Amino acid sequence: MHTRDMADTTVKVDSETRDRFAAVAAARGQSVRAYLAELAIEEENQIKLSKATAVFREIIARPGLAEAFDEAFPDDAPARRNTAGRAA
């Protein structure tokens, strides 16, 4: 969000890129400044989400984690499939 305490600066982009930003901002009912500020926040959030996803995947891949969770929360555990009698 832009506040009066923030200094303005100039970012140089080619005119095609400027026009594309302006068109997207207008379609969203925003100024280019507001659109770029929102875009930066969204991109920062995507980076954080990607990092969190990688950590989550690493953690849930640890052996025994699913079984420990099921033991700690038996009412939420998925039904066990009956694999008896299946050919290997």
Image (cartoon, grey):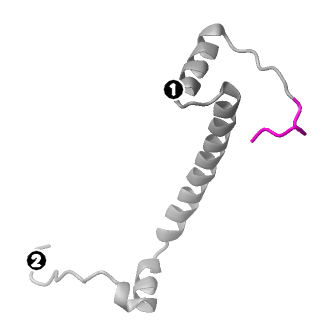
Q: CA distance from mark 2 to mark 1?
A: 58 Å
**Region of the chain picked out in magenta, as a range:** 1-7
Residue 1 is labelled as none
Q: Looking at the rendering, which quadrant does residue 43 occupy?
A: top right
Residue tagged 1: 27
- What amino acid does circle 1 point to? Ala
**In this rendering, is residue 42 above or below 54?**
above
Residue 85 vs 2, above or below: the answer is below
Residue at 85% across / 27% down in the picture? 8
For disc 2, the marked residue is 86
Give residue 3's quadrant in the image.
Answer: top right
Name which residue lies at 63% across and 52% down. 48
Q: What kind of element bears circle 1?
A: helix
Foreground pick, 51 / 76: 76
Nearest the viewer among 29 and 15 is: 29
Residue 30 point in image, percent of width and height: 61, 30
Q: Quadrant of the N terminus?
A: top right
- Label 2 crowd bin: few (<14), some (14–19), many (20+), radius 10 Å: few
Left or right: residue 63 versus residue 39 is left
Sequence-wise first label, 2 or 1: 1
Of residues 36 and 62, which is closer to you in this image? 36
The reply, left or right, for residue 37 in relation to residue 84 is right
